[in-house]
């Protein structure tokens, strides 16, 4: 299965290798209960649900956490990857802004993208330190962590996830080696608390609990 972009923005757009690595990890581990922190426009979410559907038919659950921003304001680069509602591609601008009048960053828009999986998905709007408390982490088998990128946010997200997650489960963190973010520092501090930490490439790191 190849990673698809569905005419939407994704941080994987210029790094299809990392996108494919993530899908391959999911294919290898075959989780039934998946958590993504940092949904953005839902591109990774749709790809994850497609592969989980292929593996488990309808016997899977996908949880997605995001603030689902409705603003065009740039976010702090130490906190998260750049997100903007502006569409530079004229064709996509015509389709989404003129015809559909759809804000691709909104919860409503992501729900539409994932509508074929409506009975399997659980989208939670809010900051991760509060939203994660609404999920039974003990049933989660695989996490893709790509929310806030500051050291404080990543550290707290990992604390909340590891507090209840099962042993030998998988957490993949994005932007591990990205300068200016706090992902690497927060992950490296777990060295003596988890089974293993494995770099998948310069961008993705896998934590085995």
Image: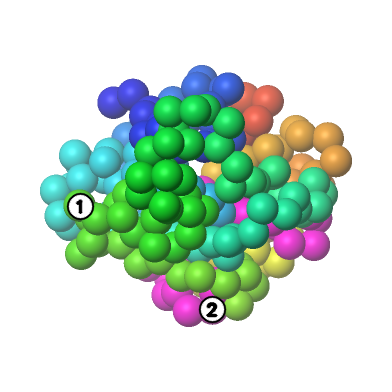
SS class, disc 2: helix
Residue 204 figure quarter: top right
Between 148 and 206, the one lying in front of the other is: 148
Q: Which mark is residue 165?
A: none
Position of 166 with respect to 160 (left or right) is: left
- Expressed as whole percent of the image width and height from the top left, the position of residue 68 reads 54, 61
**Residue farthest to the left, as pictured:** 57
- Expressed as whole percent of the image width and height from the top left, the position of residue 171 reads 53, 49
- Expressed as whole percent of the image width and height from the top left, the position of residue 138 reads 43, 70
Between 98 and 45, the one lying in front of the other is: 98
Residue 45 visible in rendering: no
Between 151 and 121, the one lying in front of the other is: 121
Residue 11 figure quarter: top right
Position of 110 with respect to 79 (left or right) is: left
Q: CA distance from mark 2 to mark 1?
A: 27 Å
Range of the magenta residues?
131-154
Provide the residue designation for mark 1: 116
SS class, disc 1: helix
The residue depicted at 75 percent of the width and 50 percent of the height is 74
Count of residue discs: 2
Q: Is residue 206 above or below residue 128?
A: above
Circle 2: is it few (<14), some (14-19), or many (20+) Cα within 10 Å? few
First along the sequence among labels 2 and 1: 1
Nearest-to-viewer mark from 2 and 1: 1
Image quadrant for the N terminus?
Answer: top left
The residue depicted at 38 percent of the width and 28 percent of the height is 3
Residue 60 figure quarter: bottom left
Provide the residue designation for mark 2: 133
Position of 115 with respect to 159 (left or right) is: left
Let me know if residue 149 is in the magenta part.
yes
């Amino acid at each position: 299965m190849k990673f698809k972009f569905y005419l939407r923005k994704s941080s994987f757009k210029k790094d299809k290798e990392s996108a494919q690595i993530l899908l391959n990890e999911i294919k290898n581990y075959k989780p039934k209960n998946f958590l993504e922190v940092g949904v953005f426009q839902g591109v990774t979410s749709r790809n994850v649900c497609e592969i989980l559907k292929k593996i488990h038919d309808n016997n899977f659950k996908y949880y997605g956490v995001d603030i689902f921003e409705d603003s065009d304001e740039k976010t702090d680069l130490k906190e998260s990857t750049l997100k903007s509602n502006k569409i530079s591609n004229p064709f996509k601008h015509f389709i989404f802004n003129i015809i559909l009048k759809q804000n691709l960053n909104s919860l409503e828009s992501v729900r539409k993208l994932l509508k074929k999986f409506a009975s399997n998905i659980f989208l939670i709007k809010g900051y991760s330190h509060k939203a994660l408390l609404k999920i039974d982490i003990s049933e989660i088998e695989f996490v893709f962590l790509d929310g806030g990128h500051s050291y404080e946010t990543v550290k707290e997200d990992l604390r909340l996830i590891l507090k209840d997650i099962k042993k030998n489960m998988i957490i993949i963190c994005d932007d591990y080696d990205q300068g200016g973010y706090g992902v690497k520092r927060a992950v490296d501090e777990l060295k003596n608390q988890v089974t293993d930490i494995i770099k998948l490439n310069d961008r993705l790191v896998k934590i085995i609990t």
